[in-house]
Amino acid sequence: MLDAPDETTRQGLARSDATIDDGPVPPEAQRSGSNARLWRWILRLTLPLLILLSSLVLYWIWFDNLYGAASWWNIIGGIALAAGVVVLVLWAFASWCFNDVS
């Protein structure tokens, strides 16, 4: 059978529960907010650049015929690249319009 907790255990639990939020904030926790903000802005600025570059390559493949005549490989690769550009556009839109959930 389990014994009931003695008085010192109860006091220790009550004391530890009461002081969880009262302690100092470690420097790592203070810096994590600024690091997240920095990475969010890097993402916001690089995604449009990736969209621009991917769209330029897609233009070269499909419309400019930089790599020669149209072939099945150009069509299949262009479709895959176009799907990637759509994903990048949605990701960029979400990174600029919505805040973090966490």
Image (tube, helix red, strand yellow):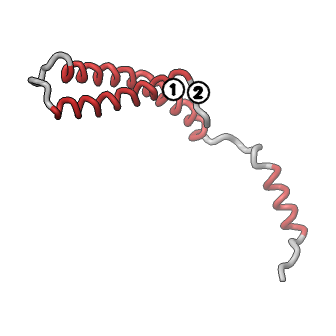
**Quadrant assignment, res 101:** top right
Q: Which mark is residue 67?
A: none
* Disc 1, SS: helix
* Total number of numbered discs in the rendering: 2
Q: Are marks 2 and 1 in contact (CB under 8 Å)?
A: no
Q: Which residue is mark 2?
A: 99
Quadrant of residue 62 within the rendered picture: top left
Residue sitting at the far left: 68
The residues bearing labels 2 and 1 have C-alpha atoms spaced at a distance of: 8 Å
Residue 17 x/y as whole percent: 80, 53
- Indicate left or right for 95 with 81 as reference: right
Q: In the rendered view of the protein, which quadrant contains the N terminus?
A: bottom right
Q: Is residue 92 left or right of residue 34?
A: left
Q: What residue does disc 1 label?
A: 94
Give amino acid for label 2: Asn
Q: Nearer the viewer, mark 2 or mark 1?
A: 1
Q: Quadrant of residue 67?
A: top left
Please say if 32 is above or below 40: below
Q: x%, y% of residue 95? A: 50, 26
The foreground one among 54 and 19 is: 54
| x, y percent for residue 39 | 47, 30
Neighbourhood count class around disc 2 (C-alpha, 10 Å): few under 14, some 14–19, many 20 upward = few
Looking at the image, the residue that sits furthest to the bottom is: 1
Work out whether residue 53 or residue 14 is closer to the camera in this orientation and state it: 53
| Element type where label 2 sits in the image | loop
The three-letter code of the residue at mark 1 reads: Ala
Q: Nearer the viewer, residue 10 or 98?
A: 98
Q: What is the crowding at mark 1: few (fewer than 14 residues within 10 Å), some, or many (at least 20)?
A: few
Task: State which quarter of the image contains the C terminus.
Answer: top right
Q: Residue at x 17, y 33 (%)?
A: 72
Q: Nearer the viewer, residue 67 or 19?
A: 67
